[in-house]
């Protein structure tokens, strides 16, 4: 049986694979697992609270209503905080002392998709065992809810108050003023369309915002962190110091330097790791990164005397390793960065603030700061497949990978990874010779596609 939860919650085509009925039942199941606060004699000690937010995509309204109904049917009060970034919902979950939180978003996916990701008390992402328990509750016997005055209530937070609380939190986590910096921010017509420009302005930067007019349909549409052409062009056009691009729920941030060159998540991690080392914030002198990070990051960190703790792909695994080792910085090449002292999940706006704070502190351009790391040529091909498990079990694929690894030797590497949210297998190849990396990746992609 296919697992319902992927690497970042439950995701699918809204009103097909992710239906209102599924959202209703997910809400009830999540309540049964996460909000069952009972004394030893089985009496409820307090009315549990769930904080629910969403991004602007049109299906979010439908799923918000269904999810909230499922939660309230189990005696959980629901606070709807509206259109806010995922990290804002996590922050508000902790701030309100809620038993759980939920964000309705498909992150960087196109508008027709949507997703639901849950947070435990304190705003922390769920471990595999908790997700498994929710799935078991979902597929088991029907969940019986309370009646009468024990049914949960649903209320809406004042949008200004929710945004104020999040932006205030971000500013308190920014180590210095950003006066004098000019930044272009691409909000992906998503959940950060209000929060990101406001936070950057209040920190002192001059902000030029693009793709910050969500209408329910245009989220991630040729914009944001997966489509950088517009922000690159706008930085050059306006003579800005940098550009920042978020995804639909703003847990990612990628950057662009003054010349319009992309600064990816690995380079951002290198910049912030050095900044935090210098300020004494880098716990255990260690950065947490995934197996997808560029070899150039490992070389740069080794030369800077910083250790790397490696983990599987997915910000939830980065978070687990951060907590296990009490580390203070981790992230992914895609732009998910986590600073546990200030956020329980990836926060793209906080990342943007920290990048600019380092620029202001050092007086260096983003290109100079990113120059600490030499990016080795890396080719990534996303191969659509019908069955990711069949690819993983394929002897032909394994043999092809072994042959190509022998070709690369110690000067490169191959990584095949099934997507956690889509029917794709990601073929990644690194080599000092970009033509060699491209050839290896294309040959392996052909083998994967043939399975």
Image: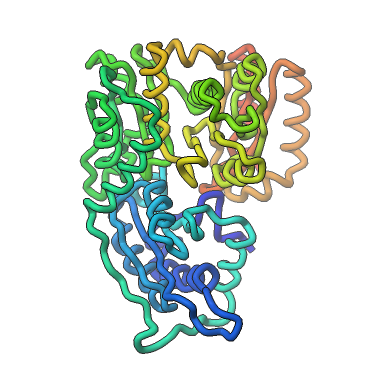
Q: How many marks?
A: 0
Q: Indicate left or right for 147 with 187 as reference.
A: right
**Residue 284: x %, y % from top left:** 65, 31
Q: Nearer the viewer, residue 9 or 353?
A: 353
Q: Kindly identify the residue that appears in the image at 31 percent across and 37 percent down.
A: 188
Q: Kindly identify the residue that appears in the image at 22 percent across and 51 percent down.
A: 160
Q: Nearer the viewer, residue 283 or 368?
A: 283
Q: Classify 428 as above or below 9.
A: above
Q: Kindly identify the residue that appears in the image at 73 percent across and 47 percent down.
A: 393
**Residue 363: x %, y % from top left:** 38, 12
Where the C terminus falls, by quadrant?
A: top right
**Residue 120: x %, y % from top left:** 51, 59
The image quarter containing residue 159 is bottom left
Where the N terminus falls, by quadrant?
A: bottom right
| Residue reaching furthest to the front | 280
**Residue 142: x %, y % from top left:** 52, 82
Q: Indicate left or right for 37 with 303 as reference.
A: left
Q: Classify 102 as above or below 407.
A: below
Query: Is residue 450 shown to the viewer in this render?
Result: no
The image quarter containing residue 114 is bottom left
Q: Kindly identify the residue that appears in the image at 50 percent across and 55 percent down.
A: 9
């Amino acid at each position: 049986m296919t697992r319902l939860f992927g690497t970042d919650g439950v995701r699918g085509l809204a009103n097909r694979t992710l239906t209102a009925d599924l959202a209703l039942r997910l809400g009830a199941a999540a309540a049964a697992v996460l909000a069952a606060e009972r004394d030893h004699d089985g009496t409820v000690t307090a009315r549990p609270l769930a904080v629910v937010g969403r991004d602007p995509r049109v299906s979010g309204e439908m799923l918000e209503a269904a999810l909230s109904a499922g939660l309230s049917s189990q005696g959980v009060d629901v606070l709807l905080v509206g259109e806010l970034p995922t990290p804002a919902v996590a922050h508000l979950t902790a701030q309100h002392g809620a038993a759980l939180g939920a964000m309705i978003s498909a992150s960087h996916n196109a508008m027709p998709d949507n997703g639901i990701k849950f947070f435990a008390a304190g705003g922390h992402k769920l471990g595999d065992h908790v997700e498994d328990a929710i799935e078991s509750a979902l597929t088991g016997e029907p969940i019986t809810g309370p009646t009468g005055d024990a049914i949960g209530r649903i209320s809406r937070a004042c949008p200004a108050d929710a945004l104020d609380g999040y932006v205030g939190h971000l500013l308190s986590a920014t180590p210095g003023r950003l006066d004098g910096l000019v930044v272009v921010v691409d909000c992906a017509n998503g959940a950060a369309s209000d929060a990101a420009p406001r936070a950057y302005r209040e920190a002192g930067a001059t902000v030029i915002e693009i793709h910050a007019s969500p209408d329910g349909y245009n989220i991630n549409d040729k914009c944001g962190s997966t489509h950088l052409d517009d922000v690159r062009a706008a930085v050059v056009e306006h003579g800005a110091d940098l550009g920042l691009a978020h995804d639909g729920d703003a847990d990612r941030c990628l950057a662009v330097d003054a010349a319009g060159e992309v600064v990816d998540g690995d380079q951002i991690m290198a910049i912030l790791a050095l900044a935090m080392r210098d300020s004494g914030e880098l716990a255990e002198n260690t950065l947490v990164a995934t197996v997808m990070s560029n070899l150039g990051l490992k070389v740069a960190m080794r030369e800077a005397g910083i250790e790397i703790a490696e983990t599987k792909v997915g910000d939830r695994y980065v978070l687990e390793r951060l907590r296990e080792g009490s580390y203070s910085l981790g992230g992914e090449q895609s732009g998910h960065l986590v600073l546990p002292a200030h956020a329980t999940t990836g926060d793209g706006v906080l990342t943007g603030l920290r990048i600019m704070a380092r620029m202001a502190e050092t007086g260096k351009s983003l290109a100079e700061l990113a120059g600490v790391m030499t990016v080795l040529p890396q080719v990534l091909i996303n191969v659509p497949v019908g069955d990711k498990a069949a690819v993983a079990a394929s002897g032909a694929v394994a043999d092809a990978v072994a042959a190509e690894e022998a070709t690369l030797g110690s000067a490169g590497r191959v990584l095949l990874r099934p997507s956690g949210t889509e029917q794709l297998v990601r073929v990644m190849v690194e080599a000092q010779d970009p033509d060699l990396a491209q050839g290896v990746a294309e040959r392996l992609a052909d083998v994967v596609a043939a399975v």
